[in-house]
Amino acid sequence: MTRSWMLPALLVGCGVLVAAMLVVRGSPGVAVPLLVVFVLLAGLHSPLAFPRSIGAQEAQERSAVDGRPIVYWRAGCKYCLRLRIGLGRKARRLHWVDIWRDPAGAAAVRAAANGDETVPTVVVAGRPYVNPSLEWVRAQLSYVGARARSR
C-alpha cells in the first residue's frame, strides 16, 4: 500500500523543497504556483485519481455478473493515468484492481503479460488485453452498455 504513495509523496516533497528555495531567494510569487503544480501532479499520480479499487477475485465475480471490463492498474503508471483521464466519468463503469494492493491482481497481470507486470491490462469476457488503446476500451464500454440495454 505504501508503494502506491511513494511517487506522490516524492512529488510533494520536491515541490516543497523547490518552493522553499524560491521563497528564500525572494521569489514567493513563483514558489506558490510551482508548489500547486507539484501538488496537482502528486494527486494525479496517487490512488485518489482512480475509482475505488477492489480485489481481483471480487472484480472477476462482478464482471461475470454485469459483463463490465476489469482494469488492472498501479499508481504512478502514466499509461494507467492516461486511460483513466481519457475515460472521464465512464471510468466508473469499469472494475479497477490495483496490482500493488492485491497480489492476486498482480499474478493475473503477470499471467497475461508473460511474467511482466505491464499495466493497464484490461480483461473483457475473461480475455486479457495488455495496454490497449483508449479508443478500444471506449468501444468495449459501448458494446457492454448496448448489450445491457438490449436485455
Image: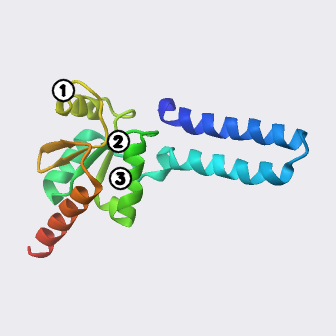
Q: In the structure shown, which secondary structural element does the residue marked by tag 2 occupy?
A: strand
Residue found farthest to the bottom:
150
Instruction: Quickly name the residue at label 1.
Output: 114
Amino acid type, residue under disc 2 in the picture: Trp
Amino acid type, residue under disc 1 in the picture: Asn
From what the image shows, is residue 33 above or below residue 89? above
Residue at mark 1 to residue at mark 3: CA–CA distance: 22 Å
Q: Looking at the image, is mark 2 or mark 3 nearer the viewer? A: 3
State if disc 3 and disc 1 touch (CB < 8 Å).
no
Q: Nearer the viewer, residue 134 or 6?
A: 134
User: Mark on residue 73?
Assistant: 2
Residue at mark 2 to residue at mark 3: CA–CA distance: 10 Å
Q: How is the image coloured?
A: rainbow
Instruction: Quickly name the residue at label 3.
Output: 83
Q: Looking at the image, is mark 2 or mark 1 nearer the viewer? A: 1
State if disc 1 and disc 2 touch (CB < 8 Å).
no
Q: In the structure shown, which secondary structural element does the residue marked by tag 3 occupy?
A: helix
Q: In the structure shown, which secondary structural element does the residue marked by tag 1 occupy?
A: loop
> How dense is the environment of label 1, judged by Cα within 10 Å: few (below 14), some, or many (20 and up)?
few
From what the image shows, is residue 125 above or below residue 141? above
Residue 57 placement: quadrant: top left
Q: Which residue is rendered at x = 31% and y = 43% of the image? A: 120
- Decide which of tag 1 and tag 3 comes sooner along the chain: 3
Amino acid type, residue under disc 3 in the picture: Leu
Q: Nearer the viewer, residue 149 or 27?
A: 27
Q: Quadrant of the C terminus?
A: bottom left
Q: Which residue is rendered at x = 30% and y = 41% of the image? A: 55
Horizontal side, residue 96 vs residue 125: left or right: right
Q: Which residue is rendered at x = 85% and y = 50% of the image? A: 28
User: Mark on residue 77?
Assistant: none
